[in-house]
Image (cartoon, helix red, strand yellow):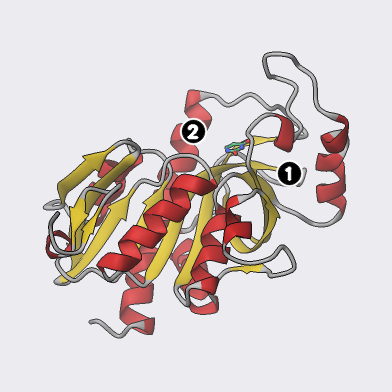
């Protein structure tokens, strides 16, 4: 086994060339899109299972882009293994379903904290422990959204272990929503929760527990009071916006917070 070899990511410390910041899309197909927007010379350095990794540079500073796959377990693996290789800051770049009726397809949600409707984070900290984003990463992402001129919302995200029952979807195989989740979207709406997705709570909890920094942005692909259906057009719009906010936000973070250039 190679020195500092990350088993699931199939990566070594040497291969990430000193990168301390990682962008984490869920979808492996989003990795080259983010990498190319960041650095035309970015290269793919590993791809094992759902974990695809590209390495790029901004003003000489190395950055990794690694897909987490869907959900908490694989997200926790990606964070653990990237941290073993030297990464200290993590930015999730994903998609989500909007819960508040004023939200629009393509809006970007900047998560300040997450409802832990998942299980992986409980392996790191008890449920009383909050899933909160790092303040400076979040500030950089807000600046990124302003500079990218993208409509954005800042606040609480609900991270569910399931796409269908936990998000009260009836566009599922059975169409049935278990009693526990019937009416839950309305409850989140009343509580000011902005969106549903599946990774933020794990990412934020794991990172706080391990003294790492994390932030999360997600592009809205469906708005629950209109439709649960996700169209290709909606996905493309949300992806374009969230990628541009992530790229600018990451540069702001490197420049202003880490003072790398
Ligand atoms: N991702 C989710 O988890 N839910 C949605 O509605 C859209 C994207």
Tell me what residue is drawn at x 33 percent, y 38 percent: 28
* Residue 117, percent from left and from top: 70, 49
**Quadrant of image for the C terminus:** bottom left
Left or right? Give the position of 220 relative to 27.
Answer: right
Q: Which numbered disc covers residue 99?
A: 1
Label 1 CB-ligand 1 distance < 8 A: no
Name the image quarter holding residue 33. Answer: top left
- Quarter of the rendered image showing ligand 1: top right
Q: In the image as oriented, which residue stretches furthest toward the bottom?
A: 259
Q: Is residue 138 visible?
A: no
Whichever of callouts 1 and 2 sits on the residue coming sooner in the sequence is: 1
* Residue 137, percent from left and from top: 47, 72
Left or right? Give the position of 115 relative to 110.
Answer: right
Q: Is residue 5 visible?
A: yes
Q: CA distance from mark 1 to mark 2?
A: 17 Å
State the SS at label 1.
Answer: loop
Left or right? Give the position of 140 relative to 176.
Answer: left
Tell me what residue is drawn at x 73 percent, y 30 percent: 165
State the SS at label 2.
Answer: helix
* Residue 45, percent from left and from top: 15, 48
Q: Which residue position is annotated with label 2?
A: 235
* Residue 80, percent from left and from top: 39, 61
Give the answer, above or below, for where 178 lies relative to 240. above
Q: In the image as oriented, which residue stretches furthest toward the top?
A: 174
């Amino acid at each position: 086994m190679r020195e500092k070899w990350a088993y699931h990511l199939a990566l070594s410390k040497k291969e990430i060339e000193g990168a301390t910041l990682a962008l984490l899309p869920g979808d492996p197909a989003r990795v080259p899109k983010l990498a190319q927007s960041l650095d035309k010379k970015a290269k793919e350095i590993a791809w094992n299972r759902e974990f695809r990794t590209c390495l790029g540079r901004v003003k000489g500073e190395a950055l990794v882009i690694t897909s987490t796959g869907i959900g908490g377990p694989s997200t926790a693996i990606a964070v653990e293994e990237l941290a073993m290789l030297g990464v200290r800051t993590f930015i999730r770049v994903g998609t989500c379903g909007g819960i508040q009726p004023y939200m629009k397809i393509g809006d970007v949600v900047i998560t300040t904290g997450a409802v832990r409707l998942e299980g992986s984070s409980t392996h790191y900290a008890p449920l009383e422990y909050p899933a909160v984003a790092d303040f400076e990463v979040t500030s950089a992402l807000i600046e990124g959204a302003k500079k990218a001129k993208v409509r954005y919302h800042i606040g609480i995200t609900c991270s569910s272990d399931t796409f269908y029952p936990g998000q009260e979807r009836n566009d599922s195989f059975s169409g049935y929503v278990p009693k526990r989740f019937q009416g839950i979207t309305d409850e989140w709406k009343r509580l000011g929760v902005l969106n549903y997705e599946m990774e933020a709570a794990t990412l934020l909890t794991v990172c706080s527990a391990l003294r790492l920094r994390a932030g999360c942005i997600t592009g809205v692909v469906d708005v629950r009071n209109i439709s649960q259906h996700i169209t290709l057009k909606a996905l493309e719009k949300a992806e374009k916006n969230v990628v541009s906010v992530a790229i600018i936000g990451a540069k702001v973070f490197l420049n202003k917070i880490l003072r790398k250039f």
